[in-house]
Amino acid sequence: MADAVQGSIGHLAEPTAPEAPVLEDIRKPWPARIRPGYLAILIVLLVFPFISTGYPLTVLTEVLIFGLFAMSLDVILGYAGMPSFGHAAFFGLGAYGTAVLAAKLGQSNLAVTLSVTLALTAVLALIIGALAIRTSGVYFLMITLAFAQMVYAAATKWTPLTGGSNGLPGVRRPTIFIPGIETTDPKAFYLFVVVVFALSFFVLHRLVNSPFGRSLVGIRENEVRMRAMGYGVQRYKLAAFVVGAMFGGVAGLLWATFNSFISPPDVYWTQSGTVLLMVLLGGSGTLVGPVLGAAFFQVLELVLSSKTEHWQIVLGAVFVIFIMFVRRGLMGIWAQFLSLRRGHA
């Protein structure tokens, strides 16, 4: 039975696009690995709040936050090949850590909240990861889900600290290192999110294109061979798990300050399922794919919910189609388009 389940979920970690030659790519200086298109997109994002405000700015802010959340999961799933169903635990820990500091302790300085977020998520990821990496496939999936449900239970039952099922309001927008400089204005907060997103993308891009990142791909493709070659497979997997968790915590920090509120549903297993769907929709094994998946998910949900009260049925049907027939996601469709274009050239 376990083998059957493993076979059914094995495609979750398939790479989205053909890999570039490894040695050639690693030997490039890091600026050469950043595509010009990324810089163009960053410029568009920075200019956007001066062109459009209001609801479109709110939606784009959500897309960037969940894009970061999806990228953090893709480090674990797409590169290390570990299908986690408990990533919401780290998202929630970053969110609740920020909320408690702001609402209970009156501390909203970004240097403090970011340090606490990274420390909490790293410690929890070390504990969960040290146990989870001893398993694989569906067993890894279930043990991460079990730990995430423990975090959800703590968020629900630890009422004096977390507010329980009522949630925790009063989360102030962060002060940018220097007291007195806050991001209370929606435009300023959006630009803050863009900067955090861009820096996170830069760090993760360098990571997955480094020898460490290529080793993770090797472990995903053939763990037995990598172990035979002398690689410390367990250490690599644990490191990937911790890195993904820390960036998931940063996304939670942004989410709590964006809403000025955090509640247990943000830590529930459905949140893990949502971000997993975003990765699969966009295409695992890339960094751009999860961001596209997050944008596609958010926009599709927004459009469908405004058109019909049965929007969840339509949304579910779209997900089924992608999982069954478009296994490489949006990035896979783009790769096929480019391949056909080169064939006709």
Image: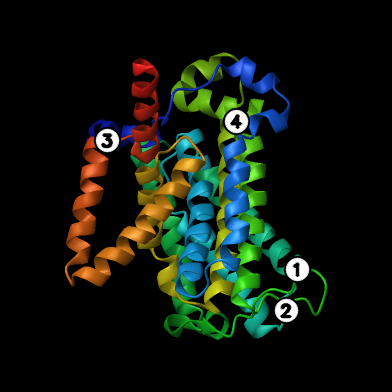
Q: Earlier in the sequence, mark 2 or mark 3?
A: 3
Pick out the residue farthest to the right: 178
Cα distance in 3D space between marks 3 and 1: 44 Å
Taking the spot 38% from the left edge, 60% from the top edge, the residue there is 298
Q: Are marks 2 and 4 in contact (CB under 8 Å)?
A: no
Q: Which residue is the site of mark 3?
A: 2
- The quadrant the N terminus occupies is top left
Dot in front, 3 or 4: 4
Q: Which mark is residue 213?
A: 4
Q: Which residue is the site of mark 2?
A: 107
Closer to us: 95 or 48: 48
Q: Earlier in the sequence, mark 2 or mark 4?
A: 2
What is the three-letter code of the residue carrying label 2?
A: Gln
Closer to us: 264 or 4: 264
For the residue labelled by badge 3, is the local secondary structure a helix, a strand or a loop?
helix
For the residue labelled by badge 1, is the local secondary structure a helix, a strand or a loop?
helix
Q: Are marks 1 and 2 in contact (CB under 8 Å)?
A: yes
Q: Which residue is the site of mark 1?
A: 112
Please indicate whether residue 268 sits to the left or right of residue 205 in the image. left
Cα distance in 3D space between marks 2 and 4: 36 Å
